[in-house]
Amino acid sequence: MTTLNFVGLSLVVLLSAIEAATVERVEYDYYKYHSMQEILKWMSQMQTDYSDLVRIVDYGKTYEKKTISLLKIGQDTGAKKKAIWMDCGIHAREWIAPAFCQYFVREILKAYKTDPKMQEMMKNMDFYVTPVLNMDGYDYSWSTDRLWRKNRSPGPSGCNCSGTDLNRNFDANWGTIGVSPDCCSNTYCGMGPLSEPEAQAVTFFVESRKEDFLCFLTIHSYGQLLLVPYGHPNYTASNYQELMDVGLAAADAIKKVHGKHYTVGTSPDVLYPNSGSSRDWARMSGIPLAYTFELRDNGTFGFKLPEDQIQPACEEAYSGALHIITYAHDKTFNGAVATAVATLWSILLAVGVTGSSLM
């Protein structure tokens, strides 16, 4: 080989290595926190890369007139489908929550390629995933105050503080317990139920098809908890035992991943009483399975969970969320098949058809 050929070959190898490294660098990093603009670009990329399964749906405006969007994920069967709801980032400072929503989307799309169960679920159900609900607050937590919690709407007349706690603003025993009338408080519940455009957006979108939703998951941090309805100690969900059984099984699934323990229960039992949460509103609206996930950790880092914990936190939470979603799916569709078979058999028996006569 001549020196010129050797140099030429080396240059080709070097350029190939640089190109590969460049591709690797620009690949979306699911194990770091992303700004609102980066997340919006990611959503567009998901729609482009999975155009047969993913569609961006705009469903509201924030106080600052940002467009609230979700990813609708599932097979387009042309038929009316059941649905799963997931929202993240209702509290601005809980950055691990939007990171989880993005991870969740990637994982279900990846699973769809090879997993028959995920293919079945995406045929039967659509996933509605809002990566960041409180967009104004999230932006503010990046630019100004890392520990900002509320949205950015102005307080009532005479108040110099901004923001309402969106998870105290839903129409579910609004303003009765675990809230503050002080507009400067982190748990200020607003001037009335659904006074905030972000809470309105979720309410109007979900209510317009609430009979379709099997499950409502809202993702928060921190505390390593799975909270079931209701936040008010004087109310008990009619399917409380089912919620607890499914939640405890989800916590078992979580623990098997990295050994982290998640406590399951109502908010008054394991955290503190509250009212006006989206979880409680969803259950009161008739959605049978409604859970709040409080992701890592137990307070060592709190809302400032280091990026090196994003991957394990997401992996374990995914396992728990998938258990709940699979339960919701199988109860509806496998149960429906069993009911149909039983009904058919009853009809056959009524007309005198037996097993032997079918042989």
Image: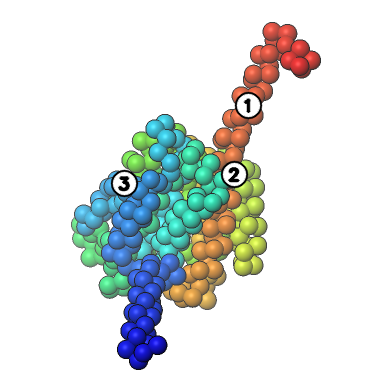
The relative height of residue 203 versus residue 7 in the rendered view (above or below) is above
The residue under label 2 is which amino acid type?
Tyr
Label 2 Cα neighbours within 10 Å, binned few <14 / some 14-19 / many ≥20: some
Q: Which residue is mark 2?
A: 327
Would you identify the image quadrant in which residue 185 lies?
bottom left
Q: Quadrant of the C terminus?
A: top right
Can you tell which mark lies on residue 339? Answer: 1
Question: Which residue sits at x=65%, y=62%?
Answer: 256
Q: CA distance from mark 2 to mark 3?
A: 26 Å
Judged from the image, the secondary structure of the residue bearing numbered disc 3 is strand
Please give the label number shown on residue 243: none
Tag 2–tag 1 contact (CB < 8 Å): no
Is residue 184 or residue 33 the one in the foreground?
Answer: 33
Task: Pick the residue in front: 7 or 167.
Answer: 7
- For the N terminus, the image quarter is bottom left
What residue is shown with label 3? 57
What amino acid type should be assigned to the residue bearing mark 1?
Answer: Thr
